[in-house]
């Protein structure tokens, strides 16, 4: 599985000191069905744990997972791939 983030989200995550490994953990939890809310249309709301703060004191983000939209965003060079080893 590949994980991508938009350039805007990447900039925001750096400003908030949100590491990629926190996103990876969140995506793995989503894959197991652990989401805060399924908003429909391949969009979920998910809490992302910040280092040293846990999930309760952290932030929520919206995650979209639609193959068609993903392909369009990749083609438009709007995404940055999150590097990790499965």
Image (tube, helix red, strand yellow):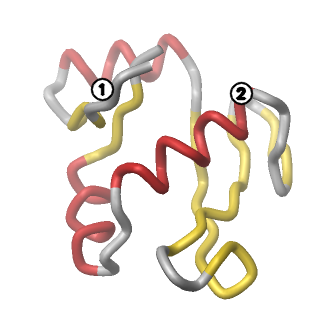
Judge from the rendering whether residue 79 lies leftward or rightward of residue 45; answer left or right.
left
Image coordinates of residue 8 in percent, x first then y, are 26, 58
From the viewer's perspective, is residue 15 above or below residue 38? below
Looking at the rendered image, the disc whose residue lies closer to the viewer, 1 or 2, is 2
The residue wearing badge 1 is 73
Residue 85 is left or right of residue 31, and the answer is left
Residue at (35% x, 23% y) in the render = 85
The residue carrying pointer 1 sits among few (fewer than 14), some (14 to 19) or many (20 or more) residues within 10 Å by Cα, namely some
Residue 73 locus on image (x, y percent): 30, 26
Q: Nearer the viewer, residue 30 or 86?
A: 86
N-terminal label among 1 and 2:
2
The location of residue 75, given as percent across then percent down, is: 20, 16
Rendering coords of residue 38 (x, y %): 84, 44
- Label 2 sits on a secondary structure element that is helix
**Residue shown at the point (26%, 57%) measured from the top left:** 10
If the image is split into quadrants, where does the C terminus sit? top left
Q: Residue at position x 34%, y 42% from top? A: 5
């Amino acid at each position: 599985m590949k994980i991508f983030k938009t350039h805007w989200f990447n900039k925001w995550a750096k400003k908030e000191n949100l590491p990629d490994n926190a996103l990876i953990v969140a995506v793995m939890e989503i894959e197991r069905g652990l989401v805060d809310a399924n908003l429909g249309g391949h969009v979920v709301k998910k809490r992302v744990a910040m280092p040293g703060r846990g999930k309760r004191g952290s932030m929520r983000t919206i995650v979209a997972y639609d193959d068609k939209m993903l392909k369009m965003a990749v083609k438009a060079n709007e995404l940055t791939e999150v590097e990790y080893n499965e």
